[in-house]
Image (cartoon, grey):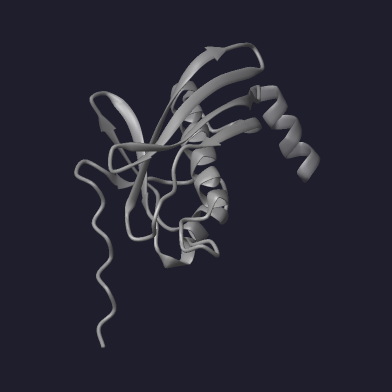
Amino acid sequence: MRAPAAPVPPAGFARHPTPDGGLADRLGPLYSGRVEGRLRFAFHCDEGHSNAMGGVHGGLLMTFADQVLGLTVQDVLGHNRVATVSLNCDFVRGVRPGCWVEGEARVTRVTRDLVFVEGTIDQGGATVLTASGLWYRRSDAGARKHAEDRS
């Protein structure tokens, strides 16, 4: 018996590096692409992402939202020294395994320490989740101190 073929990402999307540790690897490959100048992300959900009712687990969709918003912040700031402070998600509709889920976000405000961001997750052009959050932007000095504390 042959293994099923790997899903083909949407046109214009390529594998996106996830510099945040092993969790992203457990979720499956993350893809990104620029669509009409906007950075968008996608992943293929499968049976391993299901909840007890057969839909895609809400926690997985929230994790994807955290990736989408956080990676957008990194893209805007030009570095990955950020951390989620707050993430608020509202579910609009369910998702069934076996499909591509896409998301995008936009930074709405940047202060000295915080970045405000909001985004949407969709499937087949229909919104399934909306999200907003705050990301802490670590200064170079803060990042150096953190590295020293860990050594």
Q: In this view, does 14 lie above or below 120?
A: below
Answer whether residue 19 is visible to the viewer in this image: no
In terms of depth relative to the viewer, which is nearer, 47 or 78? 47
- Residue 30 appears at what percent x and percent y? 40, 49
Q: In this view, does 92 lie above or below 134?
A: below
Residue 85 lies left or right of residue 62; in this view the side is right
The part of the image, by quadrant, that contains residue 136 is top right
Residue 73 lies left or right of residue 87; in this view the side is left
Residue sticking out furthest to the right: 149
Q: In this view, does 144 lie above or below 52?
A: above
Q: In percent of the image, x 50 and y 14: which residue is there?
A: 108
Residue sticking out furthest to the bottom: 1
Answer whether residue 110 is visible to the viewer in this image: yes
Q: In percent of the image, x 33 and y 60: which residue is there?
A: 98
- Residue 44 appears at what percent x and percent y? 36, 55
In terms of depth relative to the viewer, which is nearer, 48 or 84? 48
